[in-house]
Structures are given as C-alpha cells and as structure tokens.
C-alpha cells in the first residue's frame, strides 16, 4: 500500500493504557479521519473523546522537524556523532553511572527495548528510568512482592463478568472512559451488578456507583487491612486456596488486626456504618474485581496499598477466576510494554530481575553484551537529584516532559538547565523541557510511528504508520540504534526495522524460560516482516509451541490457545464495507462488534488469566501475603492546612503536547482550576471563578476557583496538564514534594500539604484571537485553542493602560479597524479588531470575572463581519436578537453546551438517553454522560423548589 493513496489503517490509540484499536482513514487528498476498530478486543469500536479527536492533533504546527545543536539546525550525522562521543567520553572519564536515560510510556516497545539494551547491556549502567515511575511503579512493586513477578492476573472481560467492582483511586469515567463504558453496558444488562467507588472526590465515576466512600487521603491501607481482618472474623476466607497456594497469611492477618473498627473509621474518615456496608458487600460477593489506579499508586505508601488490596483477593481465592481479581489499570499507552522490556531502573528485560545474577548472566549471553548492570539504577526522583548534584553529567530525555510532570518540578528544571549535556528527543520544538536541551532530535509522532504497545490486560497491539514522516524526523528506535553504532556497538544494534527488534524481544522472553517466567511471547520469536505487518492483537503469555504456559499442575483458567484470525492491517478505502450506522450508543446492549458472552468469534483468542490454580513466580511457587500496617501520614500544618491532590481531566492528556492541538478537546476545561469545597472556600474567602493562589513549601500556582461539593472538605484538587506553553503559573507539579514510596520510588502526588488564598485581581479579562498572541503580560493567563483561533483568560493584579495592553495582544503591527468601549467609572473595557470582514481579535476587561459568552465569542472568529453594524454586538459581548448561547461545552464530540442541555431538559428531556436523541450529546464516546445527568438532576431540583 503506497503512502499517498487512499487507505484505512489499523492502529492503536496513543493515550491511556486501555489500548483501543483505531481505524485511521486517509483520503486521497490527505485528509485523515479516525474511528474505533470494531474488531479490536479492547474497545470493540468505541473511542473516548480524546481518541475521537486524534485527527485534530496530527498537524505539523510546532513540530520539531530537524536536528538542532544549541538551537542551530544541523544534519543527523553531526547531531548523532555529538551525542555518541559525549556519552562515550563521559563514561570513560566518570564511569557508566555518570550518564542516564529518562524515557517514557509514550515510546513503543521497540524503542524502549533498544534504549534499555544500550544502557544496561552496553553502557553498563541501570540509570534508565521512565515516567511510568510516576504512575505504575507501586503496582509493579506490589505485584512482585506478592506474585514474584509483575503480572496483571485479570482481563477486561472480568469487568463485565464481575458481580462487584470496587474502584479505588480511579476516576475511570474520565481517565479510562472506554472501560467505564464497558462496565456501564454490562451493568445495564445485569442491574444486580454493584459498583463501589473509593475516592476522596465525588468524581464523575460516582455516577455509576452504588456506594461512594469519600476516604481520607492515604486511608487505603487502613481500609483494606480492616477488610482483611473483617474477612477473617466473619469466616469469609478461602482456606483451601490459602493453604495450597500462599504463605504468610497468619502474619498478614495479625498485622491487619492492629486497628478496631473505630480506629479504621478514624484513619479513613469514613463512618463505621459505611465500613460495615462495604465490608459485608465484599465478603458476600465471590465475583469481585478491585480496580485501582493513581489514587493508590501515587502515594508514599503506594506499594503497601497494592499489597493490602491483593491480600484480600488472595484470602478469598478471588484471583484468576472469571470476574474476580485485583486489577491495576495503567495510565499510559505503553507503560506495560516498558515494564516488559525492563525500561525501569530496577528491572531487567523480559521480567527478569537485575538483582539476580542468573538473570543478569542470561541477558548478557543473549545480547552478547560486554557487561550488564549489576545493581539497580537511579529511579526518577533520585535521577534528577543526581543531575542536580552533578553525579549525572549527560542526560537523554525521550518522549516526555519532566519539567512539568516530575515532583518538585522547579528543582528538576534547574537541574536540567545546569546539566553539562542534555539531549531531548521529541516531536515538538517548544516544550518546557525541550527549551533546555543542548541537542534536540526530531522524533516521529503517532501516525508516523511503527511498532507495538501493550495495554492494561497484557494485550499487545500494533501501532502502524499511515502518514509520511515529515522533515527529517526519525523513529526513536532508529535514533538510539544510530547512537549505539557510533559508540562502537554496531553489531548488536544492526536492526533494519522495528519488526526485527520485536522478534528479538520475543526471543529473549522465551530464552531459557520453559514456564519459569510469566512474560513469554516466544511464539513470535520468528516473526518476519510480513508477519509483523499483519500482527493482530494478542494477550501474553504466548509461548512457542510445546512450551508450557505454566508449571505443571498449575494450569490457569483460560479459554484455549487457538490463534487469532488475520485481519488486514491496511486496506484501500473503497474495499471497506462501511457500517450502516454509527457505533451504537454507550449503553445500548453489548459493545459494538462484541457478541453475547465473549470475544468476537474468529477475531481474537479468548482472555487468559493467571493464578486461579496457583503457579506463582516465587521460589516456592506460592503467593506471599504481605503484612502491612496502616501508618499515620499527617502532612498538614497551620501554615499549610489543606491537602492538595493532583490528577487528570477528561479531555486533556499529560502536558497537552497532543491534546492542546485540538480545539474540540480544549473547550471542556479551557483553563487550570482548583476544586475546593464550599465550606473551605468560605473559610478562605474564595468565591466561584476567583483566581486562587495555591502554594506549598515548594512553589505556587495561580488557578481558577471551582467551588464544588464534589470535593472532600479539607482537600483541593488541581489538574496536572497546564504548562508554561499554555498558562502563566500553573505547573502544579512544582508544588509536589519529592516524597516517594520507600519500595517503589513512586512520588506521592496526591497528598501534599498546601494552602489556598484569593488572588486580589484588579481586573479580569477574556479574549479571542485568530492568531496566537506573541506574548502575554499578565499575572494570570491561560491560552487554549478554539475553532478558527485561540481563547484567552486573564487576571491582573493592577490596572494598565488598557488600549496599549490590547494592542500588545492584537499585535502593534496588525492592520485593520479597531472598535472600543471604555467605561472608566465601572472599569469595563472592550476592544474588537477586524481584518477586512474577519474578526482578528476581541478583548473584554472587567473588575470581576468577565460575563461574556465564551462559546458565542469563539464562534465570531469563524463568522463574516462585513456588516459594520453587526460588529457592535461583538463589542457588546453577547449574541444579538434571539441567538442562543450554547454555554460551557459538555459534549466535546458534538460541541453541545450546558445551556443547550438545560434548555432541552426544560423542554421535556428527562433522561440522558432523551438528551442524546435530541442533541446527540453522550451518544459517541459517552464520557460526558455523567455530566449530562448532573445537569438533568440540577434542573429537577430547581423545578422542585
């Protein structure tokens, strides 16, 4: 298939760890559209709002297209020679631990594999860590402590088979929307299914929950050790399983009994009644899946939390069986693949252990490497501390933005700025990290990359290229291999394609394995180019024929090993049989493409589970109960009386390097904010829409106040996405202390002592522009893409020369007509500049938050304004005549606003389904359904009053 002919390509979404299949259709004129792959077993055709908008994020605006040295464009040879010679010289002069790689769950497995191979096997250091340390390290550590391996024992199918789903520290509705919709669809068919949400915030996921436990920050260990004690006291244990397949139960139960129910209530902030109801429900429900994510992992006690959860499943034998097990859902598209290749500082490739001399010898022999790192390297927080104190003198950052995502981010930025040699491989020319690189290497982006990723249920899928690589951008694996060759390791890095790297990776997983290790995809060790091109999604383990999947006597519950049917990875557009109608609504029976009772016949191998019959990867093949005890973690003080929690929002991703390109995704939450409970807001003198200074001992941010009872009193929530590229002072990870879990090294990003105070703004502003302003001189500002341009929120501590300020935003050299309105007494100023019949920009200023319809103002950038009289409406800041104001965007897929939904409710739409039928809102990805229901319920309350 030629790259310049119309085609539809099977690939995989580059966002969260659900790993949804995507069909990318490229028209003959180059236009790209995407839809969910109905044959992919992760999503069966469904995509979330972010996945649905992928085609809006693949433009070349802001791309890094050529190698640069100190900001000067250069060729690949010069750049690669400099990187290789500097790393080689640094190692020669200061030893292998003087260099480091900091990589990313955005890398493909093949990229990860060669980077890990180069650092651990040829440079000889384990100083390669990943941003997955920030999201999944505690799960890895907990798995390894309990199972002897980093094994996720369940599959997505178990979410649909469970009778009880316990969601712990997981806003599934916003962070893993397709899994949320799979649960919602299953529950519609089986209303008796129960869902419990354990989260300090009443997130949109609570819309699905029968019970919401607003737990105190880091109360999870107390909650689940208390559950273990309850199970023991109420004869709810599977003693047969405990005896046959585990060790350490007595010690774990004794430790769990340290607190009585009153003590657990005090430690969790929950009532004894809430605890009793949750404990009895868990004890009575055999088919239980506990899903956990960052609320568990991002904690100084994260590993203990994971093991406290696992202990309860081991004690009840609820593991590896249909509809039962502990389930860590990953946050990145290839965090799992990175774990498989050993891309973390304390791991070897193929789930082998860096502390194990036999494993080190095995990997060294397989790679024919001169050495293999003999001890764990520096984990992420330690790594940047070593950069700061000079131990690390050469640093290569790949596909991540640590200046924004690391804790104590200002200190991380200072360390990178002071490092003698910094290389950054990225797709964008401007990020908060790229700006400090001595060498900038242009990497291929999604749509151009070719390789594999592994999702949360151990399913390996292909990401395929459907676009030509622009400029001189190259694949990450190629860049690393070329540096390795120039360092003298050419024979070991002579791969000609990502398929060859994948085959090597698969062969290593099977090398001297024979069922002794969980990760085995030896069946793919002989993969050639044609096989790799046609590779369909599969779950591991997938050993070569004749190799036992598990040790004898420990067979798992699984559906069989039949191979998946081949699906064409690339098809000509005119060969595709298009669906007769769009994918079915999120809750309309089964997922699109999914038949009753399981995977689609002939499309994918059945789900595979681990440990129903034991067969753990510990020396004695038994799982280990870990004796964990709750410990008090008081972080607040009179100076910092609040707890800061950080996390994600629905339509943005990480540091917005991709989602920030999409006008559709940028409208749902267009600026950084702090969620604060009404009681706390009143106490601190903060009103809704005020600008708030949130500060800790490490830094401060300015964000918009969102006063809501969904927030737990005493806690505030600030999202992690905003950077210096999109806001003035909103890099929230600069506030997070570099406190980590002692075992996993994962930072504690959700329990940070903080204070909040109203920022005394003299003026507030809102603006829209056809072009991005060159500079913004304001104390608070937040910039977001919108249809046909940009939208800007502002706040200033002191007044200005407002006409001059408007000119600085519009551009002093801009030609055109400017209309202005000045109310000096009231402090209201409005400016509109026109270029011909188009609006070039409009600025609204007021002493209070500006009451201008955002959606209407944005629409004016696309409108024709040849009628001069009509231009006065723009200065007025409101629609003329009977024109409706959509209000804040709720449904990103169809651009439906809150006012439209409220009006439909007034018109008789009394359900989410009725709103969908009338406005289409909620009928595509379904991520907004909880918000729609909230608006419906609010209108009902108003009507009742």
Image (cartoon, helix red, strand yellow):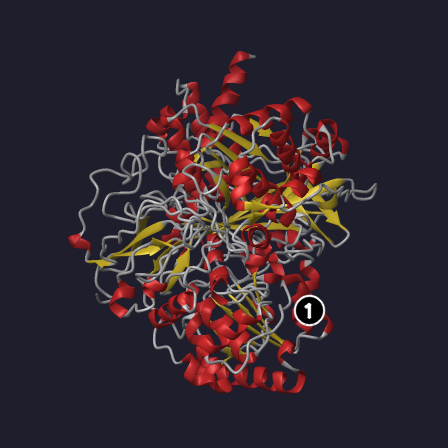
Would you say 419 lies left or right of 565 here?
right
Is residue 206 in sight in this rendering? yes
Give the percent coordinates (x, y) of residue 725.
Answer: 57, 58
Give the percent coordinates (x, y) of residue 517.
Answer: 46, 60
Give the percent coordinates (x, y) of residue 142.
Answer: 59, 50
Residue carrying label 1: 415
As rendered, which of 598 and 657 lies closer to the eye? 598
Would you say 650 lies left or right of 836 here?
right
Toward which corner of the image does residue 578 lie, by quadrant?
Answer: top left
Q: Residues within 10 Å of mark 1 (few under 14, many from 20)?
A: some
As rendered, which of 468 and 736 lies closer to the eye? 736
**Quarter of the rendering occupied by the N terminus:** bottom left
Would you say 276 lies left or right of 900 here?
right
As rendered, which of 154 and 177 lies closer to the eye? 154
Vertical order, 31 against 83 (above or below): above
Q: Residue at x 76, y 35 (%)?
A: 684
Q: State the count of labels.
A: 1
Name, please, the residue furthest toward the left.
575
Is residue 671 in sight in this rendering? no
**Quarter of the rendering occupied by the C terminus:** top right
Name, please, the residue furthest toward the right.
638
Determine the secondary structure under disc 1: helix
Give the percent coordinates (x, y) of residue 752.
Answer: 71, 47
Vertical order, 229 against 639 (above or below): above
As rendered, which of 579 and 130 lies closer to the eye? 130
Name, please, the residue furthest toward the top.
944
Q: Residue at x 36, y 34 (%)?
A: 586
């Amino acid at each position: 298939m030629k790259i310049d002919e119309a085609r539809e390509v099977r690939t995989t979404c580059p966002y969260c760890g659900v790993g949804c299949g995507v069909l990318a259709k490229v028209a003959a004129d180059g236009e790209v559209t995407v839809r969910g792959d109905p044959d992919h077993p992760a999503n069966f055709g469904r995509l979330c709002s972010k996945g649905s908008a992928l085609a809006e994020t693949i433009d070349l605006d802001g791309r890094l297209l050529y190698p640069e040295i100190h900001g000067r464009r250069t060729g690949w040879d010069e750049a690669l020679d400099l990187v290789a010679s500097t790393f080689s010289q640094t190692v020669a002069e200061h030893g292998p631990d003087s260099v480091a790689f900091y990589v990313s769950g955005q890398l493909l497995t093949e990229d990860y594999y060669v980077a890990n191979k180069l650092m651990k096997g040829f440079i000889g250091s384990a100083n390669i860590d990943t941003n997955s340390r920030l999201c999944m390290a505690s799960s890895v550590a907990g798995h390894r402590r309990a199972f002897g391996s980093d094994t996720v024992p369940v599959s997505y199918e178990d979410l649909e088979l469970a009778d009880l789903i316990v969601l712990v520290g997981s806003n599934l509705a916003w962070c893993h929307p397709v899994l949320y919709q799979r649960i919602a669809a299953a529950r519609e068919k089986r209303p008796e299914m129960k869902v419990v949400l354990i989260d300090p915030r009443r997130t949109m996921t609570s819309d699905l929950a029968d019970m919401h436990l607003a737990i105190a920050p880091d109360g999870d260990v107390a909650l689940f050790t208390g559950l273990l004690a309850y199970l023991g006291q109420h004869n709810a244990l599977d003693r047969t399983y405990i005896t046959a397949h585990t060790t350490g139960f007595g010690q774990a139960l004794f430790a769990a009994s340290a607190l009585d129910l009153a003590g657990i209530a005090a430690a969790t902030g929950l009532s004894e009644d809430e605890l009793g109801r949750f404990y009895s429900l868990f004890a009575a429900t055999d088919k239980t899946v506990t899903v956990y994510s960052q609320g568990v992992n991002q904690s100084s006690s994260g590993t203990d939390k994971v093991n406290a959860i696992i202990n309860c499943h081991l004690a009840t034998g609820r593991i590896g069986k249909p509809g039962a097990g502990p389930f860590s859902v990953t946050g990145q598209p290839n965090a799992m693949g990175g774990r498989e290749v050993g891309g973390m500082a304390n791991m070897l490739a193929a789930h082998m252990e860096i502390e194990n001399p036999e494993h080190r010898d095995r990997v060294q022999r397989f790679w024919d490497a001169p050495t293999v790192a003999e001890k764990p390297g520096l984990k992420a927080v330690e790594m940047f501390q070593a950069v700061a104190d000079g131990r690390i003198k050469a640093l290569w950052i790949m596909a991540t933005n640590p200046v924004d995502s690391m804790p104590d981010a200002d200190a991380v930025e200072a360390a990178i700025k002071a490092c003698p040699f910094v290389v950054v491989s990225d797709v964008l020319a401007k990020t908060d990290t790229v700006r400090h690189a001595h060498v900038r290497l242009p990497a291929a982006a999604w749509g151009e990359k070719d390789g594999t990723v592994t999702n949360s249920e151990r399913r390996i899928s292909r990401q395929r290229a459907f676009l030509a690589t622009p400029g001189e951008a190259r694949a990450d694996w190629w860049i690393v291999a070329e540096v390795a060759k120039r360092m003298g390791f050419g024979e070991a890095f002579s791969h000609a394609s990502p398929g060859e790297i994948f085959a090597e990776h698969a062969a290593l997983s099977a090398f001297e394995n024979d069922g002794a290790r969980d990760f085995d995809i030896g069946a793919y060790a002989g993969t050639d180019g044609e096989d790799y091109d046609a590779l369909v999604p599969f779950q591991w383990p997938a050993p070569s024929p004749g190799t036992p999947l598990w040790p004898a006597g420990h067979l798992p519950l699984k559906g069989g090993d039949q191979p998946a049917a081949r699906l064409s990875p690339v098809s000509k557009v005119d060969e595709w049989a298009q669906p007769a109608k769009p994918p079915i609504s999120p809750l309309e029976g089964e997922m699109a493409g999914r038949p009753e009772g399981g995977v689609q016949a002939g499309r994918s191998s059945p789900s595979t589970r681990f440990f129903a019959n034991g067969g753990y990867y510990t020396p004695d093949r038994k799982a280990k109960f870990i004796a964990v005890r709750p410990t008090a973690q008081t972080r607040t003080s009179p100076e910092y009386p609040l707890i800061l929690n950080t996390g994600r929002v629905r339509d943005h991703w990480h540091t917005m390097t991709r989602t920030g390109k999409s006008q559709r995704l940028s409208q749902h939450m267009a600026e950084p904010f702090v969620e604060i409970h009404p009681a706390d807001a009143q106490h601190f003198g903060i009103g809704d829409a005020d600008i708030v200074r949130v500060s800790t001992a490490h830094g401060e941010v300015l964000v918009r106040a969102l006063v809501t009872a969904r927030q737990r009193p005493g806690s505030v929530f600030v999202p992690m996405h905003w950077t210096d590229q999109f806001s003035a002072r909103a890099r929230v990870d600069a506030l997070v202390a570099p406190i980590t879990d002692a075992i996993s090294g994962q930072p504690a990003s959700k329990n940070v002592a903080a204070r909040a105070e109203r920022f005394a703004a003299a003026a507030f502003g809102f603006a829209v522009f056809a072009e991005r302003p060159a500079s913004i001189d304001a104390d608070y500002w937040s910039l977001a893409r919108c249809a046909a341009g940009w939208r800007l929120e502002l706040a200033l501590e002191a007044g200005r020369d407002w006409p001059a300020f408007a000119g600085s935003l519009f551009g002093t050299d801009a030609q055109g007509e400017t209309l202005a309105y000045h109310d000096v007494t009231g402090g209201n100023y409005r400016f509109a500049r026109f270029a011909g019949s188009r609006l070039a920009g409009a600025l609204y200023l007021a002493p209070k938050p500006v009451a201008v319809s955002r959606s209407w103002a944005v629409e004016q950038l696309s409108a024709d304004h040849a009628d001069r009289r009509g231009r006065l409406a723009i200065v007025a800041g409101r629609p003329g005549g009977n024109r409706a104001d959509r209000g804040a965007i709720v449904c990103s897929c169809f651009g439906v606003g809150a006012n439209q939904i409220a009006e439909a409710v007034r018109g008789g739409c009394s359900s989410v389904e009725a709103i969908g039928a009338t406005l289409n809102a909620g009928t595509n990805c379904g991520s907004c359904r909880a918000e729609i229901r909230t608006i419906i319920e609010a209108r009902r309350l108003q009507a009742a009053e």
